[in-house]
Each structure stands twice: as C-alpha cells, then as structure tokens.
C-alpha cells in the first residue's frame, strides 16, 4: 500500500514592523472604540456596556452596528474621546482598523 499525504496550502506568515519606538518617562493613555454593540432592547445590554452583571460576553448578544454620526449615507460609524491634562504632549498617535483577519 502506498500513501501520499499532501499538506494544504498555507498563507505566508505576516511580518510586522515597528511603527513607533521611543524611550521616555511618563504616563500612557490609550483610547479605543468599537463598531458593534448589543441591542438596546436586550435587558442585559446596559449592564454589559458598563461591565456589570453576569452577561458580559458579546457571544450572548445578537450584535448590532453602531452609527454615531447620524449620517444617512453611512451605515456604521464610531467615535472616541481622550481628555489630556494641561501641559500634556502626544508622542505618537495611530489609527488602526481591523476586520476578521487583521
């Protein structure tokens, strides 16, 4: 008996490069947002948004798109705010977007 095993094709590993590097003292602040949320009509949703309650995993919800700009030409938008103390400086900012395969 002769047996041939052929491996499936595999995507080449992604090589990541550094986008910013520095060595400085100070505090770090990060801000982020999301494009999906649980439905307002679900009683557990408000608690989940505030990390309260037993239902915190988004697998427990039928997630919905967020549309914060109220623009009829878009179907999905979000925003985030970062408050900086007086005298603060920004060393780096970056906008990153990702889907199912980042």
Image (cartoon, grey):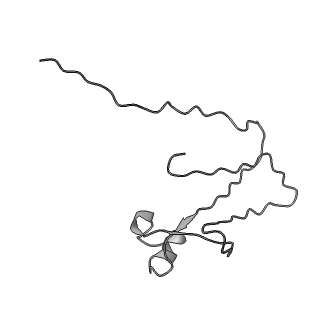
Residue that lies at the very extreme toward the left in this rendered image: 1
In screen coordinates, is 21 left or right of 42?
right
Q: Is residue 57 visible?
A: no
Whole-percent x, y for residue 60 in the image: 39, 67
Residue 68 higher or lower than 96, as above or below: below
Residue that lies at the very extreme toward the right in this rendered image: 87
Whole-percent x, y for residue 100 in the image: 50, 51
Whole-percent x, y for residue 89 in the image: 84, 51
**For the point 86% across and 61% down, which residue is it?**
86
Where the N terminus falls, by quadrant?
Answer: top left
Say which of 34 and 3 sits in front: 3
Residue 46 higher or lower than 35, as above or below: below
Residue that lies at the very extreme toward the top in this rendered image: 2
Q: Is residue 14 visible?
A: yes
Where the C terminus falls, by quadrant?
Answer: top right
Q: How many discs mark residues in the rendered view? A: 0
Residue 44 higher or lower than 2, as above or below: below
Whole-percent x, y for residue 79 in the image: 68, 65
In screen coordinates, is 88 left or right of 44?
right
In screen coordinates, is 67 left or right of 89?
left
Residue 29 higher or lower than 44, as above or below: above
Displayed quadrant of residue 74: bottom right
Say which of 81 and 52 sits in front: 81
**For the point 69% across and 64% down, which residue is it?**
80
**For the point 68% across and 54% down, which residue is it?**
30
């Amino acid at each position: 008996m002769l047996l041939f095993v052929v491996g499936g094709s595999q995507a080449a590993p992604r090589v990541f490069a550094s986008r910013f590097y520095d060595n400085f003292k100070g505090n770090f602040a990060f801000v982020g947002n999301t494009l999906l949320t649980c439905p307002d009509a679900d009683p557990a949703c408000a608690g989940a948004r505030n990390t309260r309650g037993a239902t915190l995993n988004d697998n427990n919800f039928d997630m919905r798109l967020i549309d914060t700009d109220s623009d009829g030409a878009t179907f999905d938008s979000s925003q985030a705010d970062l408050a900086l103390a007086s005298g603060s400086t920004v060393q780096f900012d970056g906008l990153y977007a990702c889907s199912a395969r980042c």
